[in-house]
């Protein structure tokens, strides 16, 4: 492969699953929904995303397990170390996802942006302390402005 300054590499905790993305990313934000909180064991999870054509599993695909966390979302994690890695959002019509969510913590190199928003902020755990000025979104989609 030719050298590409836009490639960023990532892996799970045990290293079996490795992947790469190509910048630019589509967004970066903290998600406070309970479907993120529980499997990650964390108050919120920081995600970035790229279109499918800028995402590639490099190794360990046979270690990826898929959990359908909702009618329209599939989460993937390593079956050896349990690291939560990716989330795929199906469209209502069953079409392929147009973006893949990737846990920022699984990336080993800086991306092209810092976290810029809070999603599902109205589902935030009471014990999570947030003291930044980033936009706080919520509602049914988790991406609507909160009054
Ligand atoms: Zn692993």
Image (cartoon, rainbow, N blue to C red):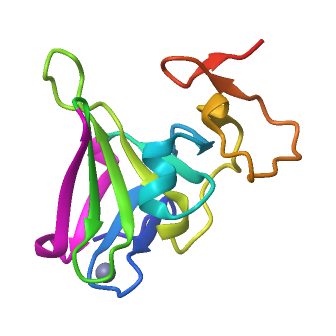
Q: Is residue 131 above or below residue 4?
A: above
Question: To which quarter of the image does residue 136 belong?
Answer: top right
Q: Residue furthest top?
A: 147
Task: Let me know if residue 138 is in the magenta part.
Answer: no
**Above or below for 3 versus 25:** below
Dividing the image into 4 quarters, which one contains the C terminus? top right
Examine the image and state in which quarter residue 83 appears.
bottom left
Q: Nearer the viewer, residue 21 or 129?
A: 129
Q: Position of residue 127 (x, y in %)?
A: 75, 53
Q: Main secondary structure of the magenta part?
A: strand
Q: Is residue 55 highlighted in magenta?
A: yes
Percent across and percent down for residue 90 are: 23, 30
Quarter containing the N terminus: bottom left
What are the residue bounds of the magenta stretch?
A: 52-70
Q: Residue at x 27, y 76 (%)?
A: 17
- Foreground of the two, 89 or 146: 146
- Residue positioned 15% across, 23% down in the render: 95
Q: Depth check: give the residue in front, 14 or 140.
A: 140
Q: For the point 32% across and 68% down, which residue is it? A: 19
Coordinates of residue 29 in the picture (x, y in percent): 62, 43
Q: Nearer the viewer, residue 16 or 131?
A: 131
x then y, percent, for residue 2? 33, 69
In the rendered structure, the answer to whether residue 103 lies left or right of residue 89 reads: right
Residue at point 55%, 25% (across, down): 142
For ligand 1, the image quadrant comes to bottom left
């Amino acid at each position: 492969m030719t050298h590409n300054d836009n490639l960023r590499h990532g892996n799970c905790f045990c290293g079996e699953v490795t992947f790469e993305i190509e910048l630019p990313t589509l967004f970066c934000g903290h998600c406070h929904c309970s479907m993120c909180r529980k499997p990650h064991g964390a108050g919120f999870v920081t995600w970035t995303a790229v279109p499918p054509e800028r995402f590639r599993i490099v190794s360990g695909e046979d270690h990826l397990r898929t959990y359908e966390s909702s009618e329209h979302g599939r989460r993937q994690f390593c079956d050896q170390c349990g690291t939560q890695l990716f989330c795929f959002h199906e469209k209502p019509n069953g079409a392929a996802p147009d973006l893949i969510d990737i846990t920022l913590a699984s990336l080993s190199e800086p991306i092209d942006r810092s976290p810029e928003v809070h999603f599902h902020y109205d589902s935030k755990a009471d014990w999570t302390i947030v003291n930044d000025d980033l936009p706080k979104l919520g509602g049914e989609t988790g991406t609507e402005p909160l009054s």
